[in-house]
């Protein structure tokens, strides 16, 4: 056992040589040197101190639902908060939750407490931290609409910052440009509503997702951001790429903005298909599609 591994294991459970295929919903990517599960902020601070002292890069990963990793092995650490940083609290119409909480679980908890505002997140398969990082959204709502404050760790200290400081915009946030600022928790302001009405809306949207999205194959959700006044799926359909396949990666016949892993696809297959779509859409429509998923370890 190497010295760094011994040091990390003094503060947190650690797995070695896990694959990004197990850590992402797309099931693509190389192996990870260390996967670390800190139990509290003291352990987290200690783990980061060890990694930085030894010049080992690290990446925070939630459910990996919006992540495309390369096939290269990652000689760093993945830090996951979803095992232990997953407590939530309801205080009147405010919900306080740690970053490792499932955003779907939080939407259900809000519903049970008669709190509306998180219904849009009831089908997003990620953590609260990931949802804040991406300013995740659906049905014309997003995290910026409900967040009051975010608790962050940076420069070896913890502080609360306002929603304005998060610089939320369409699928972007302050945290994407400042990856050393780690999201620990958030306060969300919700509104009172009838739990039965909230439940009915969530069920209606679940049925719509089942009917319109390919949820039976590995994917990272929507691949491309919608250009202004356009739908990415319609542009992809317009170039004739519905069902287009490269290696084990295929554009969904059900929803063209989903690229599925249908046959042990590798990252090269996936990116070749992504770049083909970008080039063909630009050639036909003069629009350069931007990816919504995050690329990592390329």
Image (cartoon, rainbow, N blue to C red):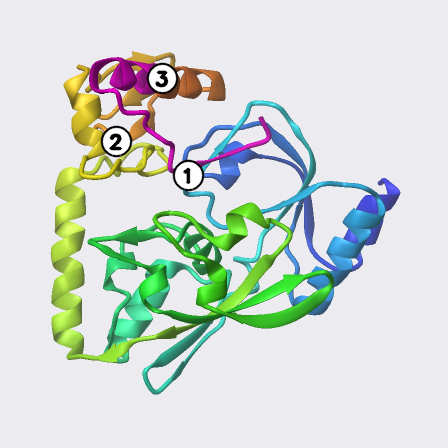
Tell me whether the residue at label 2 lies in contact with that at label 1, contact meaning CB atoms closer than 8 angstroms: no
Front of the two marks 2 and 1: 2
Please say if 212 is above or below 259: below
- Residue 170 vs residue 295, the one in the foreground: 170
The CA distance from mark 3 to mark 2 is: 12 Å
Q: Earlier in the sequence, mark 3 or mark 2?
A: 2
* Residue 241: x %, y % from top left: 22, 17
User: What's the mark number on residue 83?
Assistant: none
* Residue 286: x %, y % from top left: 25, 20
Specify few, some or many for label 3: CA neighbours under 10 Å numbering under 14, 14-19, or 20 or more.
many
Instruction: Name the residue that disc number 2 marks.
Output: 257
Q: Quadrant of the C terminus?
A: top right
Q: Quadrant of residue 247?
A: top left
The residue furthest bottom is 92
Please say if 15 is above or below 89: above
The CA distance from mark 1 to mark 3 is: 18 Å
The residue furthest right is 3
Instruction: Name the residue that disc number 1 marks.
Output: 25
Residue range highlighted in magenta: 276-298
- Could one spot residue 9 in this view of the protein? no
Specify few, some or many for label 1: CA neighbours under 10 Å numbering under 14, 14-19, or 20 or more.
many
Instruction: Name the residue that disc number 3 marks.
Output: 273
Left or right for 77, reference 92:
right
> Residue at the spot x=55%, y=59% of the render?
83
> Residue at the spot x=21%, y=28% of the render?
256
The CA distance from mark 2 to mark 1 is: 16 Å
Secondary structure at badge 2 equals loop
- Could one spot residue 13 in this view of the protein? yes
Q: Quadrant of residue 293?
A: top left
Q: Earlier in the sequence, mark 2 or mark 1?
A: 1
């Amino acid at each position: 056992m190497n010295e760094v591994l011994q040091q990390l294991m003094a503060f947190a459970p650690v797995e070695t040589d896990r694959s990004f295929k197990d850590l992402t919903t797309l099931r693509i990517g190389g192996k990870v040197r260390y996967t670390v599960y800190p139990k509290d902020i003291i352990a987290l601070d200690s783990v980061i101190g060890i990694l930085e002292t030894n010049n080992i890069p690290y990446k925070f990963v939630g459910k990996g639902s919006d992540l495309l990793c390369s096939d290269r092995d990652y000689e760093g650490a993945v830090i996951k908060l979803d095992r232990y940083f997953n407590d939530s609290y309801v205080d009147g119409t405010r919900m306080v939750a740690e970053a490792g909480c499932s955003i779907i679980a939080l939407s259900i908890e809000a519903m049970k407490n008669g709190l509306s505002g998180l219904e849009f997140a009831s089908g997003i398969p990620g953590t609260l931290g990931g949802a804040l990082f991406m300013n995740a959204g659906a049905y014309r709502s997003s995290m910026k609409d409900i967040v009051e404050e975010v608790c962050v760790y940076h420069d070896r200290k913890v502080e609360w910052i306002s929603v304005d400081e998060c610089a939320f915009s369409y699928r972007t946030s302050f945290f994407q440009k400042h990856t050393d600022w780690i999201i620990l928790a958030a306060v969300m302001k919700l509104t009172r509503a009838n739990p039965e009405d909230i439940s009915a809306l969530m069920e209606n949207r679940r049925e719509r997702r089942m009917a319109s999205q390919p949820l039976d194959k590995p994917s990272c959700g929507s691949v491309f951001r919608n250009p202004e006044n356009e739908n990415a799926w319609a542009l992809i359909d317009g170039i004739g790429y519905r069902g287009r396949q490269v290696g084990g990666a295929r554009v969904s016949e059900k929803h063209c903005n989903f690229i599925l892993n249908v046959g042990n696809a590798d990252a090269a297959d996936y990116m070749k298909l992504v770049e083909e779509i970008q080039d063909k859409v630009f050639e036909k429509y003069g629009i350069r599609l931007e990816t919504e998923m995050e690329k990592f370890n390329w």
